Amino acid sequence: MNRDSGAGFFTGLLVGALIGVVVGFMYAPKSGSETRQIVKEKVASLRHEASGVAGKVKDAVQSRIAREEE
C-alpha cells in the first residue's frame, strides 16, 4: 500500500464519519433547536481538527519539497 492510498482511506473515513454523525442527528429524539446547536458545535470542532490536519499536511509537503530540492 502506498502513501496516497492511505491518505485516501483516511479522507473517506472522515467523510463517512461526518455523514454518519449528520444522519444520526437527523434521527435523534431532540428538538430542532437542540439538534441544530449540537450540529453547529460539531461542525466547529471538525473545522478546528481539519485546520490542524491541514497544517500538518502543509508542513509535511514543504519538508518533502525541501528535501527533494537539496
Image: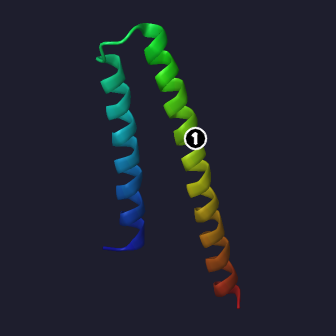
Residue located 52% across and 41% down the image: 46
Image-quadrant location for residue 21: top left
Q: Identify whether 3 is placed above or below 28.
A: below
Can you give x and y, in whole percent of width and height, for residue 56 in the image?
A: 60, 64
Name the foreground residue: 19 vs 33: 33
Residue located 46% across and 14% down the image: 34
Image-quadrant location for residue 44: top right
Q: Identify whether 65 is placed above or below 56.
A: below
Name the foreground residue: 35 vs 10: 35
Name the foreground residue: 41 vs 2: 41
Disc 1 marks which amino acid? Arg
Quadrant occupied by the C terminus: bottom right
Q: How is the structure coloured here?
A: rainbow
Left or right of residue 45, residue 12 in this image: left
Image-quadrant location for residue 20: top left
Left or right of residue 1, residue 3 in this image: right
Task: Count the marks.
Answer: 1
Q: Identify whether 20 is placed above or below 7.
A: above
Residue located 37% across and 65% down the image: 6
Quadrant occupied by the N terminus: bottom left
Can you give x and y, in whole percent of width and height, for residue 58 in the image?
A: 64, 64
Q: Which residue is mark 1?
A: 47
Residue located 28% across and 17% down the image: 27
Secondary structure under tag 1 reads helix
Q: Identify whether 2 is placed above or below 18.
A: below
